[in-house]
Amino acid sequence: MTTANFGYETAGSSFAIFGNIIKGSVFTIPQAGTANSITCSVGGGEGTAAFKYAIYNHDTLVLVGTTAASTIAKFAAKAWRTLSFASPPTLVAGTAYILVAWSDSNAPIIYYAAGDANQGHYDADTYAANFPDPLAPTHDNNKYSIYCTYTVAEVGAAAVKRRLLLGVGLQVDVWNLNKHKLKFPRLTPKTF
């Protein structure tokens, strides 16, 4: 299976506090897939801070998925920090998603660079167990240093071959796809 990223994978030089403020940016995913994790360039603030990430659908502002929570130590150095999804959401090709980070009152910081008009999104909400749904964002021009790693959905021959498994010891080998028309599959012994 192939993994890929979408978002902004460069650690920006500008920074902003995201304590009790959901902050992130909109990015369009080029391929369908299943989200595995979100990674963000963040640093510590005035105390140990809890934080987590989420994905929202940009068109509807509906929450798509949330990661597990973690903590950042007081005054921790700028670093890429990755959190995984407990229930990985399905992502649709060509869809714009808002990738966001949220933390508590201990004032950790998120890094960004100059982005496109209204690419940045923020929503002042006291940190809680659950992300608000839907999001009610205000816009800025920040391209936050945040990206999502996802497993690319299989299409075509690869998807067909993976799905056509028959019983113990046999594997369907689809050796020819001609304009989406399958030739008769060949059954070959499979050693386990």
Image (tube, rainbow, N blue to C red):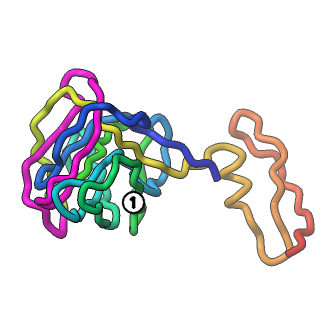
Region of the chain picked out in magenta, as a range: 102-130
Total tally of numbered discs in the picture: 1
Under mark 1, the amino acid is Leu
Which quadrant: the C terminus? bottom right
**Which residue lies at the image location 22% right of the left edge and 47% below the top edge?**
109
Quarter of the figure with residue 162:
bottom right
Q: Residue furthest right?
A: 189
Q: Which residue is mark 1?
A: 83
Q: Residue furthest top?
A: 117
Quick check: can you spot residue 82?
yes
Residue 188: image location, x then y, percent: 91, 63
Residue 35: image location, x then y, percent: 44, 54
Q: Please tell me whether residue 184 belongs to the stretch shown in magenta.
A: no
Residue 108: image location, x then y, percent: 21, 52
Quarter of the figure with residue 115:
top left
For residue 111, above or below residue 116: below
**Which residue lies at the image location 26% right of the left edge and 22% below the top edge?**
116
Quick check: can you spot residue 63?
no
Could you say whether the residue bearing mark 1 is in a helix, strand or loop?
strand
**Which residue lies at the image location 20% right of the left edge and 54% below the top edge?**
45
Residue 89: image location, x then y, percent: 39, 58
**Which residue lies at the image location 16% right of the left edge and 57% below the top edge?**
46
* Front in this rendered view, residue 60 or 74: 74
* Front in this rendered view, residue 47 or 162: 47
